[in-house]
Image (cartoon, rainbow, N blue to C red):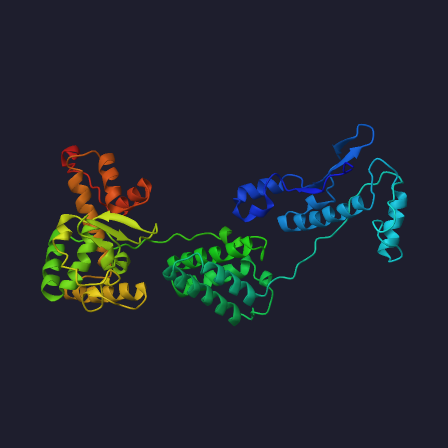
Amino acid sequence: MKVNFSEPKIYTGGVDINSWSKLTKKEQKSALAKPWYVYYSFRNPKTNRLERQTNIKGGVNKYPDKRSRHHILKIMAKSLSVVLEEGFNPYQDNSELSDYLQRRLEGKEESANKKTNVSHAPTVSIEPTVEPVQEESLSIDEAFELALSLKSKVMNSNSFVKFKSRIARFKKWLDSNDIKGGKPMTLINKKTVIQYLNDVLLNSSSRNRNNTRTDLASFYQILEDNEVIQENFVKKINVLKTKPERNKTYTPKQQADLFSYMKKEDPVLLLFVKFVCYNFLRPIEVCRLKVGDIDLVDKKLYVKAKNQPVKIKIIPNILIDEIPDLSSFSKDDFLFTDTQIGGTWETAETNKRDFYTKKYKKVKDHFGLGVNYGLYSFRHTFITKLYREMAKTASPFEVKSKLQLITGHSTMKALEQYLRDIDAALPSDYSTLLK
């Protein structure tokens, strides 16, 4: 026998409800702007064909959020499945069925599937009036534990340490303001977070306040994606203007004096600096280098970079001439340790970077250089030098196209912004134009 009805389904604004967290805010808003409903088909006794019946909305579209709508519609779809199984027919009078279902709810009747099917009574409109069930919110402690455990799986260890530290400080602030961990996470609202960010601003800087806001927005996004909260309101909190701080570039004389001093006083530090200068690596990327990452035969360098898992760069001859014989070391040995070139060094990457930063500070102090100079200054200096040399014989576009391959910037826009920040491009003398 042919079935008389199709399984009730839910329309959710034309999107896959299981991929809701992956949708953009615009896509979610567009889906919620459309009516959501339960739909099904029933066999028309005159045509003997399954025909689409009136959509069942049940008042769900008055709710502005996805959770409430979907929760109600799931109950409605399940309820409709039950009454269809028990004999509901939109083309017949269903009053007898209605009475039967009421008696069954009261425990005075067995299921019709165990007895006989009911098939009479007026056309009824199945629109269950179900209020959304307010699911019990996770506690603050539970929400923090969930978000941090999930975040630890998608962030590298260095980034996660900083992220976890900022979130922990927020948690400590909540405790000190009598917002204890056992209370529901939904108790924390936008105003609470703004108060905390203001506190961070007053006790540190606008830059730290903005970085804290970024981490909290990422933290709350995980909670929204996992439906712990309905909306990530932190993203709506404004970003403050900050005065950017960057390392200055060295003058040719400063660079020559620094190289000469390190060659005599600390050759290991000098080689570390030359990887920054000639291969345009960030200091932490140099700390990650292992002996096995250096291919002197093919002149290739394999490094875990900031914006991709592994980045391959050529090793210019000017640097190859500086690298000592590494054949006696294991491929798993780090290229730089705290005492020598090549060997084991069991500590976090950030500790390694801090170690070389402190070593270089002694050199800076010798030359009386201020806080605006650092290891990063060498990267800026040599990219500037390279850009200006290339610009002598090529157009700006050609220079930037070649330079992007060398520096490793992911996009031309990122490179252009970087060059502007370090003032790499300077005009020629325009004195004649002023006469």
x and y percentages locating residue 100 in the rendered image: 88, 49
From the viewer's perspective, tell me whether residue 39 is left or right of residue 295. Answer: right
Classify residue 200 by image quadrant: bottom left
How many numbered discs, if any?
0
Q: Is 395 in front, or is 293?
A: 293
Q: In this view, does 281 lie above or below 387?
A: below
Q: Residue extending furthest front?
A: 1
Q: Is 403 in front, or is 3?
A: 3
| Residue 248 showing in the rendered view | no
x and y percentages locating residue 179 in the rendered image: 56, 68
From the viewer's perspective, tell me whether residue 63 is left or right of residue 28. Answer: right
x and y percentages locating residue 235 in the rendered image: 49, 52
Q: Quadrant of the C terminus?
A: top left
| Residue 365 showing in the rendered view | yes
Q: What residue sits 17% from the left and 55% below the top?
A: 274
Q: What residue sits 15% from the left and 35% below the top?
A: 393
Classify residue 287 by image quadrant: bottom left
